[in-house]
Amino acid sequence: MAWAIDLQPNDIVAPPPDKNLITISYFNTENSTLYKNGSVGTVPPARLYTNPVIDTQSAILRGARTYTLGELPAVSYIQLPYGTVRPAGSLGGLSSDTGIGDLTIATAIWPYADKVNRTYVGIAGYLISPTGSYSSQRAFNLSENRFRTDLQIGFQTSIANSIDGMVAVDTMWFGGNSQCAAACGTATNASLLQKPLTTTQLGPIWRINQTFTVGASYFYVAGGATTINSRYLNNVVNTQRFLLSSQAHTPIGRISLQYGRDMEIKNGFIQTRVLALRLMKDF
């Protein structure tokens, strides 16, 4: 599976410097029907894909620090997940996985930040390292057993009195996985390579009052075709999905809730649910 860098409302707003932030998140996702080039039920063995279900749950701890880089606002963070991926339905005979996921290190800077006019341009870089639980004999793992890097640029500006608009584009690059067996449909270790994956996300953000903010995002994901042992699979990712977000600023910190799902998919297991709950506290 390939993942984009989803943003929350106002993630593109430049933060004040010299803040420490701790975020605790809970993610629950469910994937089901397998698509291949827009069709269902054409991937052998058919018995595995009559009613596939992949349930993933994870808790993520993130520590961040805001600062200035020269005269530019900046933030760096490190995060580590712990979770479970469990195949079910017609995939119920396959092994599940529980443990630590892949470590992420990220840094963002804002070359342009106009708080008066609520206009921001931010650039972020991400490094995801293969620190998590992985076995070549499992088809589903918490780790991807490969390095990933991502570069993202985001723009947010005021479009009405209490409504902003945001757009962000990121591209993820993948290192190779030379120990891909069950996930690659091979009896012995194979070499997995993947093309870059580009995601565009955009939508409105409505600040209802000092406490509550809501947002909606549309995503278009393209690229990410894979090659196994030099055999091109012609499985380009071409996905459209949505994500609804809400935030509440409370005395215990910022509470965020997000819900979304795929609307259209060309290749892969369609995501029927993503639910994210977060608590962020600064000090």
Image (tube, grey):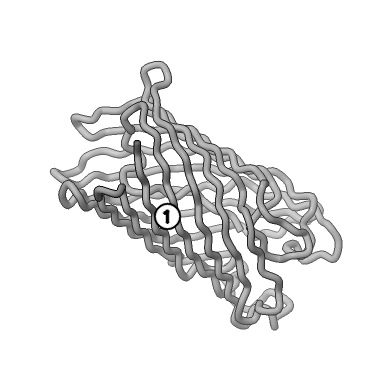
Q: Nearer the viewer, residue 261 or 60?
A: 60
Q: Looking at the picture, tell me which residue is in the foreground, 274 or 169.
A: 274
> Please, which residue is most extreme toward the right here?
188
Which residue is most to the left? 161
Q: Position of residue 141 (x, y in %)?
A: 67, 60
Q: Quadrant of residue 66?
A: top left
Is residue 171 shown left or right of residue 146? left
Query: What residue appears at the point 42 percent right and 63 percent down from the top-left corner?
Result: 275
Give percent across and percent down for residue 178: 79, 50
Q: Which percent across, then down, holds residue 142?
A: 63, 58
Mark 1 lies on a secondary structure that is strand
Quarter of the image where the C terminus is located: top left
Q: Is residue 144 left or right of residue 219?
A: right
Q: Amino acid at mark 1?
A: Phe
Say which residue label 1 marks.
219
Residue at 40% across, 39% down:
21
**Rendered position, 238 above or below 129:** below
The one nearer the camera, 107 or 155, is 107
Residue 127's place in the image compared with 85, above or below, is above
Task: Please tell me whether residue 12 is drawn above or below residue 91 in the rendered image.
Answer: above
- Quadrant, the N terminus: bottom right
Q: In the image shown, does 113 or 170 lie closer to the viewer? A: 113
